[in-house]
Image (cartoon, helix red, strand yellow):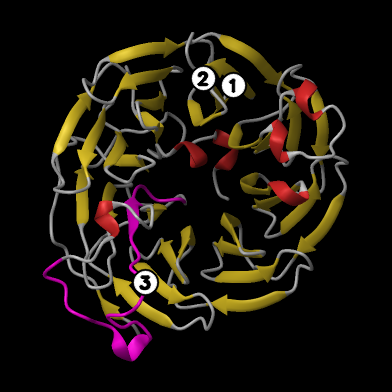
Amino acid sequence: MGGGGSALRVCADHRGGINWLSLSPDGQRLLTGSEDGTARLWSTADGQCCALLQGHESYVTFCQLEDEAAFTCSADHTIRKWDVHTGQCLQVFRGHTSIVNRILVANNQLFSSSYDRTARAWSVDEGQVSQEFRGHRNCVLTLAYSAPWDLPGAPCAEEVGGLLVTGSTDGTAKVWQVTSGCCHQTLRGHTGAVLCLVLDTPSHTAFTGSTDTTIRAWDILSGEQLRVFREHQGSVICLELVNRHVYSGSADRTVKCWLADTGERVRTFAAHRHSVSALKYHAGTLFTGSGDARARAFDARSGALQRVFRGHAFVINCIQGLPPHSPQSLRSPEAKPVLKGNGISSKSRPAAVVISLANCLEDTSEEPKYTSFQVLWNMSFVLHTLSFLSEGGGVPGTGGLTHPAWACPSSRGW
């Protein structure tokens, strides 16, 4: 079994649980979105809060941090753009008629998904809707974008403006032409909600995970179902695609590693005591977050458990990694070589990861509680950021759950 991690710093300025976090491309800033309706910018160097982003009228569901701007979306049906230096709100994006679940900034466009059953494309600079994608019959949960230059050989790639892929609780994924808003393909085959998806742009392949316990691979140009990955015994909650391997985290308490090209299962990581809700691969290490309130680090090649992070009470729902050459991914001067017996030595390549904790994924008889924390893993260097929300709150009709991916009425009892 792996050793444990230790907390170096606590940042607890939020007055509500943290639903999501995002790192800047250079790894120097961290953005957190909270149940208290605010977002905060933090320095990853010292854990200090740099800016308080106030303006949303309900809880913040998701956020994305770019070099010069921060983007947040909320249960107040809006998206906001913020100046990262002053904390000033630069733009409010209005148009959705229900909770905005996810946002994605790419190619000078902002894409959003909502419980109003639509996805939308916006001009980042003007704040206006440039396209609306209608066709799903239930909540749109997850998004992925393939730019025109990622589609070599695809007919009319430039004209369609790239492809947007959306996953929904209606059991389908859809591929949309960004310029026209037309549905290019509907990917049918799942018998449950599509909770997660990842794109392999060179091969034009989408991988989707569902409550039907399967992962499916699709050609996003033709709509053909290429493969079905069937060994999980519970909902597939999260996916990671690295080096032609697909990693999947499931409610069956396992992570599985698959060959992307064949669907062959090559490894199972089975040390979890609850659903696996978050994954991040970094420099040969697979980090996992689980409903058992622990984060774990595995050797991705051998499957050996290297480290367990203990001390938290609720499910981990987000893991993000620092860029390998950012200042914070360098070894702490005070750090000593550790984990030699577990395959990591002082000569190993530095690795860093950020982990966020949020609310429960499943209905329980108890009132849900919320908590979030950040972990910067640098061999023996660990930083935790924690924020707590007391009982109560949440979306009406969901038993108090506020995390967007689980707030749809149709998601009860998954």
* Image coords of residue 370 (percent x, y): 29, 46
Q: Quick check: is 339 in the magenta stretch?
A: yes
User: Of all residues shown, which one is farthest toward the bottom?
Assistant: 341
Label 3 crowd (10 A; few <14 / some 14-19 / many >=20):
some
Name the secondary structure under disc 3. Answer: loop
Judge from the rendering whether residue 228 lies leftward or rightward of residue 20; answer left or right.
right
Q: Which mark is residue 116?
A: 1
Residue denoted by label 2: 98
Tell me the residue that label 3 is attached to.
349
Image location of residue 92, percent across then percent down: 40, 11
Q: CA distance from mark 1 to mark 3?
A: 45 Å
Element assignment for label 2: loop
Taking depth in this image into account, of 400 and 133 the one nearest to the observer is 133
**Residue 57 x, y percent position in the rendering:** 32, 17
Indicate the amino acid at tag 1. Asp
Residue 59 % position (x, y): 34, 27
How much space separates mark 3 and mark 2, taking CA atoms? 45 Å
User: Which residue: 48% across, 10% down?
Assistant: 127
Examine the residues drawn in magenta and state their main secondary structure.
loop
Closest to the camera, between mark 3 and mark 2, is 3
**Residue at left 85%, top 51%?**
225
Work out whether mark 1 precedes mark 2 in sequence or the reverse, and give the earlier one: 2
Determine crowd level at label 2: few under 14, some 14-19, many 20+ residues with C-alpha closer than 10 A.
Answer: some
Residue at the location (42% across, 62% down)? 290
